[in-house]
Image (spheres, grey):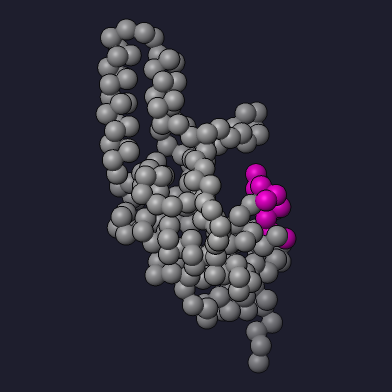
Amino acid sequence: MQNPNPTLNLYLKKLAMDNISKHISYSEATTSATAIKNGIDNTPTAQHLSAMKNVAAKVFEPLRTYIGEPIRIASFYRTAKLNPLIPGASTTSQHMVGEAIDIERYASSKYKNADLFAFIYQNLNFDQLIWEAGNDKEPDWVHVSLKASGTQRKQALQMYRVNGSSKYKEFSLWQSIKDTVKANKAGFGSALLFGALAIGAWKFLKL
């Protein structure tokens, strides 16, 4: 006899699915509180599922191996019906075709979100990598996409907010250092600050 609870049925269906990769279950890649609240079936198509497995294998798993500890998936797959309900979501979001994933550190992690960003930026292939909100030292989360086919743009951006609206600029570590120094008074203190940031930047790029 079929369980009359549609939410439970969907949960059981997801439990029965194969994992997306070694460290990503089907459930965590597709479950959305917003989808459940609005009664939206967030099941990917076979094509979208293939794209998700590609992102997992070529981006998430290499990062997971480097980190050596769990990484929280903030958002992975979104159907075209679900995506508009996510605050700030792009109308052309690659989440809708399984090519993008949002990740972040767990509170107990010894790594920062900036470390996740840095490893991907320096070591992995990607289409788009976004330092999402936060500040120049630490993003609130990291968005990364990888096209299932075609040329990857290798576009690194930094998202910031102005009066509640999301804005984007090209990510530049060295520009962040200059802006930080410029914001401080000139003199010995700024020289020391610049030196510390420069050393940090060198370590950042050498991950």
Residue under the point 55% across and 32% down: 169
Residue 100 higher or lower than 42, as above or below? above
Which stretch appears magenta? 81-92
Q: What residue appears at the point 48 percent right and 61 percent down from the top-left corner?
A: 55
Image quadrant holding the C terminus, namely: top left
Q: Is residue 116 visible?
A: no
Q: How many marks?
A: 0
Instruction: Looking at the picture, tell me which residue is in the foreground, 92 or 3.
Output: 92
Q: Main secondary structure of the magenta part?
A: loop
Identify the residue at horizontal 28%, vertical 36% (top origin): 203
| Residue in the foreground of this view, choosing between 172 and 15 | 172
Does residue 90 lie above or below 95 as drawn? Answer: above
Is residue 102 found left or right of 203 in the rendered image? Answer: right
Query: Residue at position x 44%, y 20% from top?
Result: 179
Whether residue 145 is in magenta: the answer is no
* Percent x, y of residue 139: 46, 39
Name the spot of residue 17 as percent of width and height, x first. Answer: 52, 78
Query: In this orientation, does residue 26 appear?
Result: yes
The picture places residue 67, in percent across and down from the top left corner, at 32, 54
| Rendering quarter of residue 147 | bottom right
| Residue 40 at x, y percent in the picture | 70, 66
Left or right side of 33 for 63: left
> Which of the 4 image quarters holds residue 172?
top left
Among all residues in the image, which is located at the extreme bottom?
1
Question: Does the stretch in magenta take in 90?
Answer: yes
Query: Which picture quadrant has residue 12?
Result: bottom right
Which residue is at the far top? 187
Q: Is residue 125 above or below residue 207?
A: below
